[in-house]
């Protein structure tokens, strides 16, 4: 998951070589809005979001309730127009989720319960990467056992220097789930290190989007005194010495009494995307509904399953 330049939105035309377009011909607003209604946010369980650095591909996850299945889905531009969603070439057999681009735009990191090899009988979630060569995605590659453990690893986020942040029940961690980082040097990952107490607590911290320049991060925490309900979004910054400062709770509207998680910030750092299972106000608006209206609501976005949302965003506004 950037904010400096104005965006022009259209399905077919960009206002400049650097403008970003999104599906549904809509603009992000100053308040939270459903993202790509009926295209991506469509009443099914759709969650986590990533867009390629060049703005040509979107990846998200569609899941069956109770996590019985989980498939990474993507959209791509064809002559300036967004395609319909389709299964990502490297997904669809196992439970895959949480695609995240590296800065090169040709590498995706993701979490999956696929077997590491033919002898792997343990169905835990590990981190994988897949590379695009000559316009096609190759076979995914396991990130190895310095990164991956017997626990579940989720929600990768990669900085420009290759450092890998993710969620895990960390050995010697601070809480139930921690956000950790594997420093990357000489083409090798160091062992995971749990982030400091300014980020992690004795409770749950998970699903961190780290700015590619590593100047700020967004993540979800659950069980804190200022948590509105089932998990809220927080932001944290680095100081001039590179230390993570105390995380700050994002305001109501972004956060609700429901679960708000899976943050992502666009290339220009001016739009925040996130996932929420908040329900539509149409369910409890004091009006009697017939069967047709009820089933329509239950099969639409805002029905309590995961949907994608977006809002204009200035990462410096919360310092």
Image (cartoon, rainbow, N blue to C red):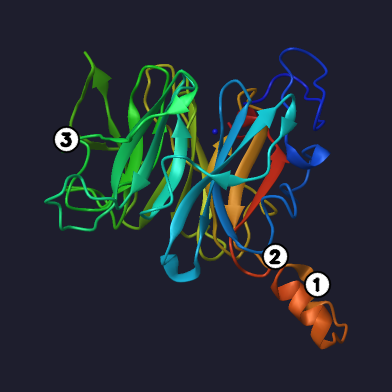
CB under 8 Å between discs 1 and 2:
yes
Q: Is residue 260 visible?
A: yes
Residue depicted at 82% across the width and 38% down the height: 25
Tell me if 206 is positioned left or right of 234 in this view. left
Residue 267 percent across, percent down from the top left: 60, 24
> Residue at the location (83% across, 79% down)?
293
Can you tell which mark lies on residue 53?
none
Which residue is more in the foreground, 227 or 38? 38
Judging by the rendered image, the residue that carries numbered circle 3 is 146
Within 10 Å of disc 3 (Cα), the crowding (few <14, some 14-19, many 20+) is few
* 5 left or right, relative to 139: right
Name the residue carrying label 1: 282
Kindly report the distance in space between the C-alpha atoms of the residues bearing marks 3 and 1.
48 Å
The residue drawn where x is 45% and y is 45% is 98
Location of the N terminus by quadrant is top right
SS class, disc 3: loop
The picture places residue 28, in percent across and down from the top left corner, at: 77, 38
Comes first in the chain, label 2 or label 3: 3
The residue closer to the viewer here, 23 or 82, is: 82
Q: Position of residue 205 (x, y in %)?
A: 39, 50
In the rendered image, the vertical position of residue 131 relative to residue 290, given as above or below? above
* CA distance separating discs 1 and 2: 9 Å
Which residue is denoted by mark 2 in the rendering? Answer: 302
Whether residue 196 is visible here, answered yes or no, is: no
Task: Label 1, secondary structure: give it.
Answer: helix
Foreground pick, 163 / 135: 135
Q: Is residue 116 left or right of residue 47?
A: left
Secondary element type, mark 2:
loop
């Amino acid at each position: 998951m950037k904010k400096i330049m104005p965006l022009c939105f259209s399905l077919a035309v960009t206002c400049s070589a650097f403008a970003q377009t999104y599906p549904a011909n809509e603009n992000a607003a100053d308040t939270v809005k459903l993202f790509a209604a009926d295209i991506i946010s469509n009443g099914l369980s759709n969650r986590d979001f990533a867009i390629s650095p060049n703005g040509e591909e979107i990846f998200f996850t569609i899941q069956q309730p109770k996590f019985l299945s989980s498939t990474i889905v993507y959209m791509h531009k064809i002559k300036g127009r967004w395609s319909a969603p389709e299964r990502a070439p490297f997904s669809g057999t196992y439970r895959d989720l949480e695609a995240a681009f590296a800065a090169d735009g040709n590498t995706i990191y993701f979490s999956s319960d696929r077997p590491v090899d033919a002898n792997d009988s343990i169905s835990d979630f590990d981190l994988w990467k897949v590379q695009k060569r000559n316009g096609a995605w190759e076979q995914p590659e396991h990130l190895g056992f310095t990164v991956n453990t017997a626990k579940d690893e989720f929600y990768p986020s990669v900085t420009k220097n290759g450092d890998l942040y993710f969620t895990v029940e960390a050995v010697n961690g601070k809480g139930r789930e921690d956000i950790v980082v594997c420093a990357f040097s000489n083409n090798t990952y160091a062992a995971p290190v749990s982030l400091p107490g300014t980020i992690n607590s004795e409770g749950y911290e998970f699903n961190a989007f780290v700015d590619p320049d590593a100047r700020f991060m967004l993540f979800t925490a659950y069980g804190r005194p200022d948590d509105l309900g089932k998990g809220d979004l927080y932001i944290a910054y680095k100081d001039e010495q590179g230390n993570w400062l105390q995380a700050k709770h994002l305001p109501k509207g972004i956060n609700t009494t429901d679960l708000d998680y899976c943050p992502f910030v666009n290339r220009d750092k001016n739009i925040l995307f996130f996932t929420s299972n908040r329900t539509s106000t149409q369910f409890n608006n004091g009006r009697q509904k017939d069967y047709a209206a009820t089933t329509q609501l239950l099969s639409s976005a805002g029905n309590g399953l995961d949907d994608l949302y977006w809002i204009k965003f200035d990462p410096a506004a919360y310092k």
